[in-house]
Amino acid sequence: MNNGDIVIIGQSDRPCSEMAAIVTNVHQDTCNCQYLSEKKNDYPVMKRHPENLTRITDFGVRLVIEGLNYSCEPQDDLECIAKYHDGGLRKWQEEKPESEQLSMKAIEIMSDLGMMEKGE
């Protein structure tokens, strides 16, 4: 995992845009994560082991930012390789991309990481 990776946390979070989080700090054996969605702005920074994080690209989707909104959109050049612990394929669970508003925390983090312009 790297700072700025967009992930789904654990196996109980539904793989969808609302549950996408950003890795904010990588430690020796843990990563700090923050949800992107304004709906989850009150959630604290979460510390997770990297094996409990799945990059959204492993689901065959990429983050698309438009202004202060984002979505996770399927990409023809990416194959879903995300798996549950039992080895079963874990698919993205949105029929079509759902637009979410970025939280102020996420905007600040992404700006600090150079992922978007300040004031965007």
Image: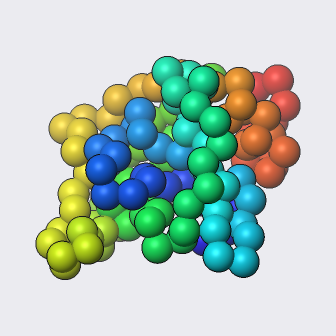
Way the structure is coloured: rainbow
Query: Foreground: 20 or 118?
Result: 20
Looking at the rendered image, the quarter that the C terminus falls into is: top right
Q: Estimate the x, y position of residue 47 in percent, counting from the top left.
A: 61, 55
Q: For the point 49% across and 21% down, which residue is it? A: 39
Number of numbered discs visible in the structure rendering: 0
Quadrant hosting residue 98 = top left
Up the image or down, 16 lies above or below 92; here it is above
| Res. 23 image quadrant | bottom right
Residue drawn 42% across and 39% down? Answer: 19
Q: Estimate the x, y position of residue 96 in percent, counting from the top left.
A: 25, 35
Q: Residue 49's image quarter?
A: bottom right
Image spot of residue 73 (x, y percent): 38, 45
- Seen in the picture, residue 65 relative to 115 is either above or below; the reply is above
Q: Is residue 14 visible?
A: yes
- Quadrant placement of the N terminus: bottom right
Camera-nearest residue between 77 and 101 = 101
Q: Is residue 22 left or right of residue 86?
A: right
Residue drawn at the location 74% of the way across and 59% of the way down: 25
Q: Decide if residue 116 is on the left or right side of residue 12.
A: right
User: In the rendered image, is residue 60 in sight?
Assistant: no
Residue, far left: 88
Residue 6 left/right relative to 83: right
Of residues 27 and 60, which is closer to you in this image?
27
Tell me residue 48's x, y (percent).
56, 60
